[in-house]
């Protein structure tokens, strides 16, 4: 298994992302969408943070603890005008 590097949300802007989907299992994708919607609700209602594990274009795995402001069709919006493509997200806690 690859090493997971913790990253600050402000540094995500400097990363490049691939168009490839990191999850191959349909059930895992549905779970990710459910977890993203839960994280959005927790972020907006309770102002609580969630932990997002994601992969960049080079295959490096990062983890960020942040408030999820909005979930779109293709991207997740975080504070500081930061976005992560949903297809790059491995896990949301």
Image (tube, grey):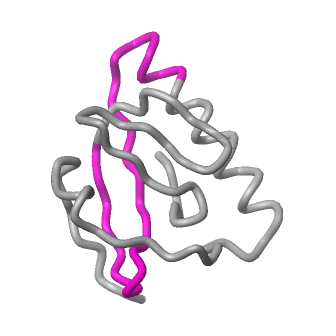
- Tell me which corner region of the image, top left, top right, bottom left or bottom right, holds residue 67: top left
Where residue 15 appears, as percent x and y from the top left, is 28, 68
Which region is colored magenta? 41-65
Q: How many marks?
A: 0
Residue 4 lies left or right of residue 28; in this view the side is left
Where residue 39 appears, as percent x and y from the top left, is 50, 32
Residue 63 located within the stretch drawn in magenta: yes
Residue 47 located within the stretch drawn in magenta: yes
Compared with 89, 31 (above or below) is above
Looking at the rendered image, the quarter that the N terminus falls into is bottom left
Compared with 82, 19 (above or below) is below
Compared with 1, 16 (above or below) is above
Residue 45 lies left or right of residue 32; in this view the side is left
Work out which residue is located at the far right of the displayed protein and give it: 26
Where residue 56 appears, as percent x and y from the top left, is 39, 74
Where residue 58 appears, as percent x and y from the top left, is 37, 87
Residue pictured at 69% horizontal, 40% vertical: 34
Residue pictured at 23% horizontal, 71% vertical: 5
């Amino acid at each position: 298994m690859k090493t997971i590097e913790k990253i600050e949300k402000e540094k995500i802007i400097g990363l490049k992302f691939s168009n490839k989907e990191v999850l191959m299992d349909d059930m895992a994708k549905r779970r990710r969408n459910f977890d993203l919607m839960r994280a959005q609700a927790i972020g907006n209602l309770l102002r609580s943070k969630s932990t997002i594990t994601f992969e960049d274009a080079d295959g490096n795995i990062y983890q960020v603890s942040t408030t999820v402001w909005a979930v779109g069709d293709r991207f997740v919006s975080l504070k500081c005008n930061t976005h992560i493509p949903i297809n790059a997200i491995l896990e949301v806690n």
